[in-house]
């Protein structure tokens, strides 16, 4: 995401007002208390939108953000914000609870109730703001999960961390058909995180099913290099049958074998063209990405890219003459 506000280019006397205006106009109205004096304030904020969702990527010196009772009472567009901790730590306080977020953690807070965000070590955070109505969760259920760390103990939250941390900075997803296509999966994924945190199997069932394809493809990407990656293993990892796995992927337009092979070939192509492309044999690179037969690997590589693996490597690493 290209930054829209960088205090390095703003005179110190104007920094606090510029930051306040950017945050209020694009995300939410909050009181902002900076730790350092004006001349030492350093803030770099990138802002965007994915349909009705607002996204923000922020790095800054120490700051405290407060959504006061007055601001919460005047809220005309109730929203829920997901905070994603990239590095360092921060604290979220709302509804009588407080939680410390560390790298890989997320937490939600709602605009209709006062909250405080403390970034004593500085800010390295991503924020995704959802319309409250889009989540379609009972008020009590939402209140019970605000200011609760969503992280290592919740596999859906781990997926959400990866997904939303990328969504917040992916310019190509912030406009046009790509943005439109990302809205509903984003809403369903957050609903799945929040309902699974409650252990509410009834409320969680629909969003969990809606995000199953996303969770499966993420699992496959993480295990592409495993020679024993199979439909049975993937299904078992997600507590579903092989038949259900194929049905879920089919609804997303994915043919499992083709999808795996395409991404394995892409990794081989990247490695062959990389700076270490000549350090291993072509067959060894193919084997490392699940192609046990060197002849088969060369054949499918050429069918896919119109060039043999050897010719592709020579093209990117011509031998000295």
Image (tube, rainbow, N blue to C red):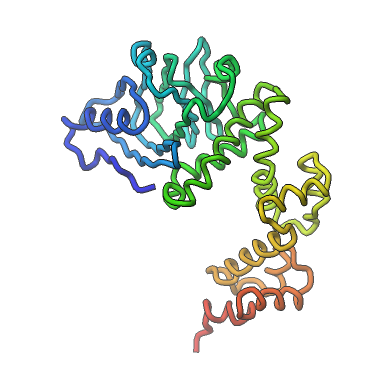
Residue 93's place in the image compared with 308, above or below, is: above
Q: Residue at x 40, y 39 (%)?
A: 57
Q: Residue 307: x and y, percent?
A: 61, 80
Residue 231's place in the image compared with 137, above or below, is: below
Q: Residue at x 70, y 38 (%)?
A: 209
Q: Nearer the viewer, residue 34 or 136?
A: 136
Q: Is residue 93 left or right of residue 44?
A: right
Q: Residue 12: x and y, percent?
A: 18, 33
Q: Residue 126: x and y, percent?
A: 45, 36
Location of residue 206 (image quadrant):
top right
Location of residue 52 (image quadrant):
top left
Q: Residue at x 77, y 48 (%)?
A: 245
Q: Nearer the viewer, residue 312 or 188?
A: 188
Q: Is residue 226 left or right of residue 69?
A: right
Residue 134's place in the image compared with 285, above or below, is: above
Q: Residue at x 60, y 82 (%)?
A: 311
Q: Residue 105: x and y, percent?
A: 55, 31
Q: Is residue 100 left or right of residue 234?
A: left
Residue 295's place in the image compared with 60, above or below, is: below
């Amino acid at each position: 995401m290209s930054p829209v506000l960088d205090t390095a280019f703003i005179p110190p006397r104007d920094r606090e007002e510029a930051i306040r205006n950017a945050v209020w106009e694009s995300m939410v109205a909050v009181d902002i208390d900076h730790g350092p004096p004006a001349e030492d304030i350093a803030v770099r904020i990138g802002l965007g939108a994915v349909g009705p969702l607002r996204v923000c990527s922020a790095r800054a010196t120490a700051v405290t953000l407060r959504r006061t009772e007055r601001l919460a009472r005047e809220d005309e567009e109730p929203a829920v914000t997901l905070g994603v901790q990239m590095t360092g730590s921060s604290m979220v306080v709302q509804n009588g609870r407080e939680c410390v977020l560390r790298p890989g953690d997320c937490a939600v807070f709602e605009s209709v109730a006062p909250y405080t965000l403390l970034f004593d070590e500085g800010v390295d955070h991503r924020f995704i703001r959802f319309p409250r109505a889009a989540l379609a969760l009972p008020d009590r259920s939402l209140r019970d999960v605000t200011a609760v760390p969503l992280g290592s103990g919740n596999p859906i939250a781990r997926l959400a961390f990866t997904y939303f941390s990328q969504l917040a900075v992916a310019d190509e997803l912030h406009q046009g058909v790509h943005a439109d296509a990302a809205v509903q999966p984003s809403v369903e994924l957050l609903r799945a995180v929040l309902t699974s945190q409650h252990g509410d199997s009834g409320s969680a069932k629909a969003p969990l099913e809606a995000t199953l394809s996303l969770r499966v493809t993420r699992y496959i990407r993480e295990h592409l290099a495993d020679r024993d990656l199979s439909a049975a293993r993937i299904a078992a990892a997600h507590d579903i049958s092989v038949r259900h796995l194929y049905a879920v992927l089919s609804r997303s337009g994915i043919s499992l074998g083709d999808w795996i092979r395409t991404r394995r070939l892409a990794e081989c192509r990247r490695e062959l063209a990389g700076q270490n492309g000549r350090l291993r044999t072509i067959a060894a690179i193919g084997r490392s990405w699940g192609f046990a037969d060197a002849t088969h690997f060369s054949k499918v590589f050429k069918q896919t890219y119109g060039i043999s693996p050897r010719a592709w490597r020579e093209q990117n690493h011509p031998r000295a003459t």
